[in-house]
Amino acid sequence: MKVTIDLPDSLLKELSFGFADLDRELKFLLAVKLIEMGRISTGRAAEWIGIPKPLFLQEMGRYGLSAFPLDEKTLEQDILNAKKSIL
């Protein structure tokens, strides 16, 4: 399936794309959102975009994103567990 999106030139001028290929950049952004939603894995996303998984993870880091998002409750529990193991 192919999807076409109209983007005004003014919007494109405001955006800074890391990939030279706009199609690849937009796929990357969609893939990251699908990962956040739990719909696809990072491996599947990398395969779809056509880059190695380590490069995909590196690109996520460039955007300040993590492949392993933590919510506040999970982080607090991890801190408590770490403190218990030290004592």
Image (cartoon, rainbow, N blue to C red):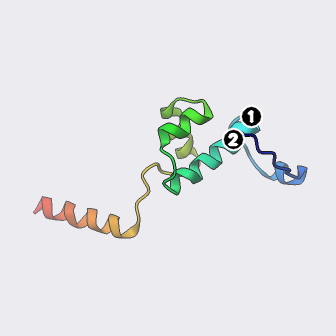
Q: Nearer the viewer, residue 23 or 79?
A: 23
- Badge 2: few (under 14), some or many (20 or more) residues near its Cα, within 10 Å? some
Horizontal side of 20 relative to 35 (left or right) equals right
CA–CA distance between discs 1 and 2?
A: 6 Å
Per the image, label 1 sits on a secondary structure element best described as loop
* Residue for point 55% across, 40% down: 45
Determine crowd level at label 1: few under 14, some 14-19, many 20+ residues with C-alpha closer than 10 A.
few
Quarter residue 56 falls in? top right
Picture coordinates of residue 27 (x, y %)? 67, 42
Q: Quadrant of the N terminus?
A: top right
Q: Identify the disc placed on residue 21.
A: 1
Is 2 above or below relative to 33?
Answer: above
Q: Are marks 1 and 2 in contact (CB under 8 Å)?
A: yes
Q: Position of residue 20 (x, y in %)?
A: 73, 33
Callout 2 amino acid: Glu
Residue 25 numbered tag: 2
